[in-house]
Amino acid sequence: MRLPLRLGTPLLIGLLLAGTAAAQPSPDTDPDGVVAAVEAAYEQLDYETAEALAREALTHYEAFTPDQLVRLHTLLGLILYARGEELEAAAQFRAALTLDPTLTLDPLLVSPTTIAFFERTKEAFLQEQSAGGSPGGGVRYVTVYDPRGAAFARSLALPGWGQRFKGERTKGWVLTGVWAAGLAASAASAYRYHQVRQAYLDERDPDLIPDRRDTMDTWFKVRNNVLLGTAVVWALIAVEAGITGGPEERMAVGPAPGGASLRLRF
């Protein structure tokens, strides 16, 4: 992701800065406004205000989207690097990279020296990740993905698909087979009911009509029960896909000693 630091209009920047002392946007109610205020202060070269706002925002990280957190960490890294605090700047860049390993800086808005430092940090970060190491940094983000909702929808569309989506391939295929067997039994019983019903309608011998009718009634019940059973199995498979198995960590980047561990739920 290329990070173009937004250039607001002078009027918007002025309004944002004028309201800083009076009432800052709250992360809980206006996370977009908080990020905009940090960017506005940065663009006005008011690094002290931008840093204070960014650090305060990151204490409420759970209120922000991953993209917003990337912007906050990147802005903070740029500010710290401009002040010569390279170690902490690298830690902020790494925190952003844990959420977006494709992050790049816009050369039209960031100096070549800063971009070179960022690229070195990124290269080291990616090498550590590919080697299975634990990249250092003061912040550790763990993105948590819960597949159960998507699994429920898939098994509702095709029984067993949701289980396979969660990685339970054997269970998924078995459940698909159970449902398919029920579907086949439903089709067979419906066909048999059609046959015996037609035999009853075609029967002319008064002595055989009661037997024909009893046979038809029996297969009517069999057909309905098999259809109901197949529908119940379908529903249970979908419910099972939606309630079993908890959230799973899709990304975990090791923190530096004493680093904070932050969880983001998608």
Image (tube, rainbow, N blue to C red):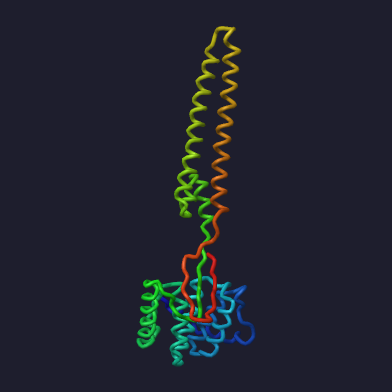
> 6 or 239: which is nearer to us?
239
Q: Which quadrant of the view contains residue 93?
A: bottom left
Q: Which quadrant of the view contains residue 204?
A: top right
Residue displayed at 47% across by 70% down: 252
* Residue that sits furthest to the right in the current view: 22
Question: Residue 100, position in %: x, y?
Answer: 43, 72
Q: Quadrant of the N terminus?
A: bottom left
Residue 106 shown left or right of residue 160 in the figure: left
* Residue that sits furthest to the bottom in the current view: 84
Say above or below: 220 vs 112. above
Q: Is there any visible trace of residue 133 in the rendered image?
A: yes
Q: Is there any visible trace of residue 1 in the rendered image?
A: no
Question: Residue 63, position in %: x, y?
Answer: 58, 72
> 23 or 220: which is nearer to us?
220
Question: Residue 162, position in %: x, y?
Answer: 49, 50
Say above or below: 78 vs 135. below
Residue displayed at 51% across by 62% down: 248
> 1 or 128: which is nearer to us?
128
Q: Which quadrant of the view contains residue 29?
A: bottom right
Question: Residue 37, position in %: x, y?
Answer: 54, 81
Q: How many marks?
A: 0
> 135 or 33: which is nearer to us?
135
